[in-house]
Amino acid sequence: IAEGSGFLVDTDGTVLTNLHVLNKLAELNQSETGHANSTVDLEGISVYCAFERGVNGQEEFILLPMEIVAYQAQGDLAALRFVNKIYTDTGSGTLVDGFTDVCEFRTDLPQRGEPVYAIGNGVAYGVAISDGIVSAPNFSAYREEYGYDMIQTDCPINGGNSGGPLLDEDGRVVGINT
């Protein structure tokens, strides 16, 4: 059993996360090769999205099955989609297909010193938010390994936060926690 985070990127229910959260071989690969996704095995895994809500003063979890629709091993990314059709209540009793709210992406890089926020499900304790600043917006030390530059931040990334969004002050996605 692995736990990680993800975030909604379109109204049809596509969720972006890290591939190493799903890859059965990630831990073994990391210890043997230093690359979590040097080989990928997704055979037979079950993926669920857990929603937490309080009901009558007690915590209740709703698990919804998801499917893996695409992944990119080098970049450590995976796209998931809900298996069942999702409906959203607009508040007036009207149901609409899909989700009404999704994450907005920022189109430019954050600047050095800019505040950022990592959101995830750190070690399954529920939603965790940590804050920090951008140290290097074009950190290139891992470009060859991942195929792109990283955003280096001093924002604490806890176990289980992998796959969650890194947000700017306006709540726009600037990166993915890994």
Image: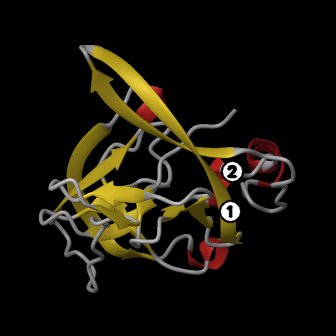
Residue 129 coordinates in the image, percent (x, y):
26, 41
Q: Residue furthest bottom?
A: 107
Q: Residue at x 68, y 50 (%)?
A: 22
Q: Nearer the viewer, residue 151 or 16?
A: 16
Label 1 SS: strand
Q: Earlier in the sequence, mark 2 or mark 1?
A: 2
Cα separation between marks 2 and 1: 9 Å
Q: Residues within 10 Å of mark 2 (few under 14, many from 20)?
A: many
Q: Is residue 72 above or below residue 26?
A: below
Question: Quadrant of the rendered structure where residue 168 is?
Answer: bottom left
Q: Residue at x 47, y 65 (%)?
A: 13
Q: Disc 2 vs disc 1: Cβ atoms closer than 8 Å?
A: yes
Q: Which of the two marks, 2 or 1, is nearer to us in this view?
A: 1
The kind of residue tagged 1 is Ile
Residue 68 is labelled as: 1
Q: Residue at x 27, y 73 (%)?
A: 104
Q: Is residue 20 above or below residue 158?
A: below
Q: Quadrant location of the N terminus?
A: top right
Q: Is residue 171 above or below residue 70?
A: above
Q: Residue furthest front?
A: 93
Q: Nearer the viewer, residue 43 or 77?
A: 43
Residue 93 coordinates in the image, percent (x, y):
21, 53
Q: Is residue 109 above or below residue 121?
A: below
The kind of residue tagged 2 is Leu
Left or right, residue 120 beside residue 84:
left
Residue 91 coordinates in the image, percent (x, y):
16, 53
Residue 97 coordinates in the image, percent (x, y):
40, 68
Q: Badge 2 is on which residue? A: 22
